[in-house]
Image (spheres, rainbow, N blue to C red):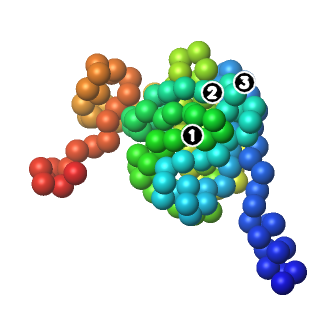
Amino acid sequence: MEALQAKISADRSSPEYGWTTDGKLWCVTALDRISAHNGTMRLPSYVAEMTRGEWRATVPGRLAAGPVTVDGTFAKGLQTAFSLTSAQNGDQVRLAFDVRARMLDISVGGFELTDSHAVPGAYEDDIDESNEESEDGDEDLLQPPRSADASTP
């Protein structure tokens, strides 16, 4: 029984958060099975208070990941981002909120995401210019590549 309790305690990791040098509020936490399936994440109280409302989300490569809403202490609407990044149980997820622009950069990986000096998200070198402009006219946010077969989403 004690071994099981120790394993459960080790599996639970406290989220880390802080500010990047370019002024983004970031939060890193481990993704559990339920969150990966539902597209929700519990946020630390401080982060949730600073980020209430709707955010325009992107994943590396500047792919638009849809709107994400912070309501209470939960970020909701992360299904698209988790799908685009192949996120799964146990992955580390980093949310970087650009409070002024209401933009949210979502990165998925390992423990390297807790490095507060590394700013997640894409830079100009990562942008695939062959993608089309997003539906709402935002040229800087690219949509996921479309399949050549029209019957495939």
89 in relation to 138, above or below: below
Dot 3 corresponds to which residue?
Answer: 21
Separation (CA) of disc 1 from disc 3? 23 Å
Image side of residue 80 versus residue 73, left or right: left
Residue 28's image quarter? top right
Image point 53% across, 21% down: which residue? 102
Helix, strand or loop at disc 2?
loop
Image point 32% across, 41% down: which residue? 144
Give the amino acid at mark 3: Thr
- The residue nearer to you, when weighing 74 against 146, is 74
Give the amino acid at mark 1: Ala
Image side of residue 74 versus residue 67, left or right: right
39 in relation to 139, above or below: below
Using the rendered image of the protein, determine whether residue 12 is visible from the camera's viewpoint: yes
Separation (CA) of disc 2 from disc 1? 9 Å
Dot 1 corresponds to which residue?
Answer: 75
Give the amino acid at mark 2: Thr
Camera-near label (2 vs 3) is 2
Dot 2 corresponds to which residue?
Answer: 51
Q: Position of residue 60 (x, y in %)?
A: 48, 40
Residue 8's image quarter? bottom right
Helix, strand or loop at disc 1?
strand
Image point 58% across, 34% down: which residue? 71
